[in-house]
Amino acid sequence: QNVEPLRAEIESFFDAGINHSQPVVSGADGRRALSLALRTLEQIHEHTLRIGAASFIQNS
């Protein structure tokens, strides 16, 4: 059965709360994933600014 990964993770979290068990993805794992995603977005933003500045300088 194909289940969207985020949906499966959320369902696991709810099931863990109802059944007093451990979710598939721990809070620490979720925190690390969020930290990585935020750092990635920050790097993309910084790279975009550098590329934009370089493009502006070349076209001047």
Image (spheres, helix red, strand yellow):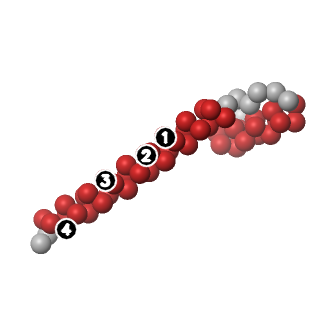
Q: Earlier in the sequence, mark 4 or mark 2?
A: 2
Given residues 10 and 50, the one toward you in this image is: 50
Label number found at residue 56: 4
Q: Earlier in the sequence, mark 3 or mark 2?
A: 2
The three-letter code of the residue at mark 4 reads: Phe
Note whether 57 is above or below 1 in the view shown: below
Give the percent coordinates (x, y) of residue 21. Answer: 81, 27
Give the percent coordinates (x, y) of residue 22. Answer: 76, 27
Contact between marks 3 and 4 (CB within 8 A): the answer is no
- Distance CA(mark 1)–CA(mark 3): 16 Å
The three-letter code of the residue at mark 3 reads: His
Question: Which residue bears the numbered disc 2?
Answer: 40
Q: Residue at x 83, y 36 (%)?
A: 17
- Residue that protrudes farthest toward the bottom in the picture: 60
- Distance CA(mark 1)–CA(mark 2): 6 Å
Mark 3 crowdedness (10 Å alpha carbons): few <14, some 14-19, many ≥20 = few
- Distance CA(mark 3)–CA(mark 2): 10 Å
The three-letter code of the residue at mark 1 reads: Leu
Question: Which residue bears the numbered disc 1?
Answer: 36
Give the percent coordinates (x, y) of residue 56. Answer: 19, 68
Contact between marks 4 and 1 (CB within 8 A): the answer is no
Horizontal side of residue 46 vs 6, given as left or right:
left
Residue 2 seen anywhere in this rendered image of the structure = no
Mark 1 crowdedness (10 Å alpha carbons): few <14, some 14-19, many ≥20 = few
The three-letter code of the residue at mark 2 reads: Thr
- Distance CA(mark 4)–CA(mark 2): 24 Å
Q: Earlier in the sequence, mark 1 or mark 3?
A: 1
Given residues 26 and 2, the one toward you in this image is: 26
Question: Which residue bears the numbered disc 3?
Answer: 47
Note whether 48 is above or below 16 in the view shown: below
